[in-house]
Amino acid sequence: MPTTGFAVLTVTELTTQIRLSLEQAFPELWVQGEVSNLRTPSSGHLYFTLKDQTSQIRAVLFRGVANQLRFALRDGLQVIVRGRLNVYEVRGDYQIILEYLEPKGIGAFQLAFEQLKEKLEREGLFDSVRKRPLPFFPRKVGIVTSPSGAVIQDMLTIMKRRCPVLSVLIYPVAVQGEGAAEQIAEAIAILGRRRDVEVIIVGRGGGSLEDLWCFNEEIVVRAIAESKVPVVSAVGHEIDFTLADFAADYRAPTPSAAAEVVSPVLDDLIESIVSRWDRLVQHMQGKLTVLRHRVQLSHREIPDPMRWVYRQAQRLDDLNNRLRVALRIQHLNIRPRLLALSSALTVHSPQARIGCALVLVPQLLSRLKHAILGSVGLKRHVFQSRLSGLNTLNPLAILSRGYSVIESLPEGVIVKSAKDVSPGSRIRARLAEGQLSCVVDEVRTDP
């Protein structure tokens, strides 16, 4: 078809005009729908489709806005969004650039609360088995709260009235707004590492869900669960519940109630101790009276212990006399046998036998001497004969007659022929006394 008189647009020009028209026609709009096909790339931007029963439109939630969400976006969630219409020119798709997003029918804070509660509950942070009992009479109480306001003053007044000797350590923090959760978590960790703090109160006065939100932050809940000392949560009023309440070892309905829980009434304790002491004294006195009466009744039946001692001493003397008589009779009966055995030992005494043997000793010594001299002379003759043969074969004896042993250097090989060396060779001559290091000047092989 002829194009004369028509304006021909490129695809880019057409897409740009559509984008400008849509952006001018819909500078801001509110849309509700269901989230589907959610994608979360590493860039941090969120891409998904917003749909209803018959239609759908692409939506983009850039990272800056996505980081402000209190809850986790997921497929199937009904949401209400605010944004502006835009055309992604690369694909020619139109989409909504979101500036705000909230769940439909439920607030963002409430949804975030439920999602985080479900997550931490699966991890066991709310299990009752891990909760510890509070100390009955703590030496020092740590309080994490705002230093200003009526809450801290009420708590201090109650603890001073109930237990004046109780020591209190206040860690001031912000209890709402940006950075409050980090301050509260740090305070719990620091107080939990102190050896003198035995219990920690974390709390503030009442407020809206948004005001109390820092006590729902994951960093605070985990700090409470990981604390080395018991933690009492005292956030808001009795109807207010935060995730800190579920993680704490004890949940107080109000800060004032928390102060009462950790501080016993000193007067009541003293009265209880005095009463128990009086009852103990009365009980012991009654016991002593009963036991004294029993002793008095049984004393008549118990014999004098000294009588038993005297009786046993008399029996011991009697047995001692009987033992002496028995030993004397036994000695008289054994004496004749001892005399007979003594005579027999004298006859067979080794001393008597040695005396007889001493007469033969000189003769035996003389015979032994002659035998030893003859054996030594024979051995000396054999030794000298063998020594003479060894001297004949001794190389040193040959060297002493003027001979020498020649070795080549540096190998140390014995030179047996003049052919084994050449002029300039270094040799060593071993003599009967010492050795010579020489250099061969001339070699002759003729006789």
Image (cartoon, rainbow, N blue to C red):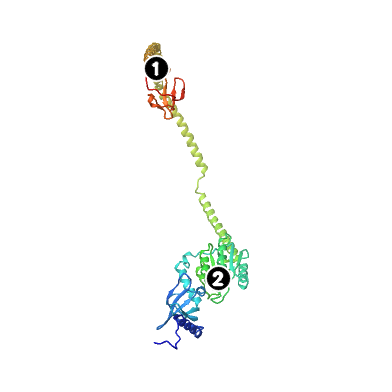
Q: Nearer the viewer, residue 218 or 290?
A: 218
* Residue picked out by circle 2: 234
Residue type, mark 1 in image: Asn
Whether residue 178 appears in this view of the structure is: yes
80 up-or-down from 118: above or below: below
For the C terminus, give its image quadrant.
top left
Q: Nearer the viewer, residue 411 or 244?
A: 411
Decide which of tag 1 and tag 2 comes sooner along the chain: 2
Where does the image place residue 407, in percent across and percent down from the top left?
42, 26
Q: Nearer the viewer, residue 222 or 12?
A: 12
Q: Quadrant of residue 446?
A: top left
Q: Quadrant of residue 355?
A: top left
196 up-or-down from 146: above or below: above
Distance of label 1 from label 2 (alpha carbons) = 116 Å
Q: Residue extending furthest bottom?
A: 5
Element carrying mark 2: strand
Element carrying mark 1: helix
Answer few, some or many: residues within 10 Å of disc 1's Cα (few below 14, many 20 plus, some between 14 and 19).
Answer: few
237 up-or-down from 385: above or below: below
Where does the image place residue 128, in percent across and percent down from the top left?
47, 67
Left or right: residue 357 compared with residue 116? left
Whether residue 94 appears in this view of the structure is: no
- Residues marked 1 and 2 touching at CB (< 8 Å): no
> Of the numbered discs in the image, which one, if any, rests on residue 239?
none
Q: How many marks?
A: 2
Q: Name which residue lies at 38% across and 25% down.
A: 419
Q: Nearer the viewer, residue 406 or 301?
A: 406
Q: Name which residue lies at 54% across and 73% down.
A: 213
Left or right: residue 360 compared with residue 212? left
* Residue picked out by circle 1: 391
